[in-house]
Image (cartoon, grey):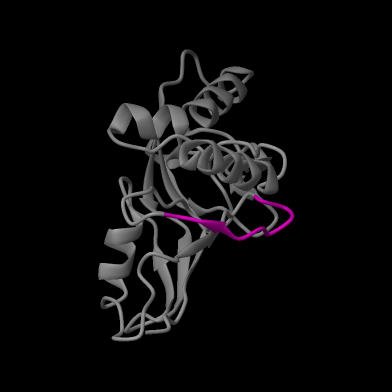
Amino acid sequence: MKRALLLIALSAAILSLGPAQADPPPQVRGDDDIRDQYRLGAGDKIAILVNDEPDLSMETKVRPNGKISYSFLGEMDVTGLTIRQVEKLLASRLADGYLRNPVVNISIQSYRMYYINGEVAQAGGFPFQPGLTVRKAVTLAGGFTERAAENKIVVIRGGDPQHREKPIGLDDPIFPDDILTVPEGFW
């Protein structure tokens, strides 16, 4: 009987969550993962290196409109593209009248921010780092305060246009533009 009531309660809880939401982007681990999975956005600072062409190599920041300015090619929208996609885009546009077989390499100099507020020692915005988890984010924010409800942390994912708060665990990944809230616990 208890098992049946537990199953009914669990089913009701799952149904109350509403329709399934898109999964967050995969956690970024190594350099190859970063190149293929990390999607650029406003605030990312990148270095562009074109082999044997120092005049075409530069550092730039993705502006709020999602664009970068690049020598000879002008404005380019890179928001939502992976590093590898931007490398291919630049190489193909440089090959169209400028260079023969250009080799373009892009690296991220600094990532855009994630944010943490509530019951942490130092709330604010912090630069994203590959492999970042909630536990690491809280540590970077100086740790929990004495009043923190460590098991009731919520996140608003940066890519969620409806800005829905979702529960998140200490070992779950954090992504750029995420907003973490650590609520106050009641003894």
Q: Is residue 105 visible?
A: no
Q: Is residue 96 visible?
A: yes
Q: Nearer the viewer, residue 27 or 4?
A: 4
Residue occupying the point 58% across, 25% down: 89
Q: Is residue 81 left or right of residue 109?
A: right
- For the stretch drawn in magenta, the main secondary structure is loop
Q: Is residue 165 magenta?
A: yes
Write the start and end of the magenta stretch as one range.
Answer: 160-168
Q: Nearer the viewer, residue 12 or 125?
A: 12
The C terminus sits in image quarter: bottom left
Residue 71 location in percent, x, y? 57, 42
Q: Is residue 99 magenta?
A: no
Count of labels in the image:
0
Q: Residue furthest front?
A: 1
Residue occupying the point 35% across, 83% down: 122
Q: Residue furthest top?
A: 101
Residue 17 location in percent, x, y? 66, 47
Residue 42 location in percent, x, y? 59, 55
Q: Nearer the viewer, residue 112 or 68?
A: 112
Q: Is residue 78 above or below residue 183?
A: above
Q: Quadrant of residue 116?
A: bottom left
Residue occupying the point 32% across, 74% down: 141
Q: Is residue 123 left or right of residue 19?
A: left
Residue 53 location in percent, x, y? 39, 32
